Image (cartoon, helix red, strand yellow):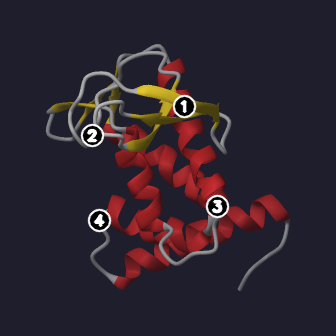
Amino acid sequence: MRCPFCNSPDTQVKDSRPAEDNTSIRRRRVCPDCGGRFTTFERVQLRELVVVKKNGRKVPFDRDKLVRSFEIALRKRPVERERIERAVSGIVRRLESSGEPEVQSEEIGLLVLEALKNLDDVAFVRFASVYRDFSTTEDFEEIITEFSAKIARETGVQHD
């Protein structure tokens, strides 16, 4: 692993342990040249995924971008970081185990919507407003009605 401080090609691992979400290994490293210390995370990657955008452009899948999407939707919401990591890891696992090397961006968006429904109602509506390109208050009313109907079906409780 290259040192991020001095760019030395050789660094030493001083400590390794499972990360909080148990889907990665956290490694503390030190550079013998400059003495800099830093942390890296190692994850299992089943395959290289390519995201096909709406315009047909293809880009490498970026897990960090997926995490940022969750963080933006969940900003100032009472959701623990561990739950976000589990949701992201679950989406990545589903995508990697699908067997397809290319995935449509719309599919990722739907998986994020599904995960946010289970994490936080407000974050779900926030993400849906961007993902579905809301332009009127009626768009918000429609998604809230749709969401309320789904909850009523699942719980057997009617909301007015």
Disc nearer the start of the sequence (2/3): 2
Mark 2 in CB contact with mark 1 (< 8 angstroms): no
- Identify whether 55 is placed above or below 132: above
Q: Nearer the viewer, residue 62 or 153?
A: 62
Amino acid under label 1? Lys
Relative to 98, say whether 110 is above or below. Answer: below
Q: Residues within 10 Å of mark 2 (few under 14, many from 20)?
A: few
The answer to which of marks 1 and 4 sits earlier in the sequence is 1
Q: Is label 1 or label 4 in front?
A: 1
Q: Residue at image x 79%, y 76%?
A: 158
Q: Residues within 10 Å of mark 4 (few under 14, many from 20)?
A: few
Question: Mark 4 or mark 3, which is nearer to you?
Answer: 3
The mark that comes first in sequence, 2 or 1, is 2
Residue to which mark 1 is pinned: 14
Cα separation between marks 1 and 3: 36 Å
Picture layout, residue 21 above or below residue 13 = below
Q: How dense is the environment of label 1, judged by Cα within 10 Å: few (below 14), some, or many (20 and up)?
A: few
Per the image, the residue denoted by label 3 is 119
Measuring from the top left, give residue 30's x and y in whole percent: 42, 35
The tag on residue 133 is: 4
Q: Residue at x 42, y 16 (%)?
A: 47
Q: Which residue is denoted by mark 2 in the rendering?
A: 4
x and y percent of residue 6 in the render? 21, 38
Amino acid identity at mark 4: Asp
* Closer to the eye: label 4 or 2: 2
Q: Amino acid at mark 2?
A: Pro
- As drawn, the label of residue 24 is none
The picture quadrant where one finds residue 1 is top left
Mark 2 vs mark 3, CA separation in Å: 35 Å
**How far apart are labels 2 and 1 at the CA level?**
16 Å
Question: How far is disc 1 from disc 4 in space, using C-alphas?
Answer: 47 Å
Q: Nearer the viewer, residue 140 or 6?
A: 6
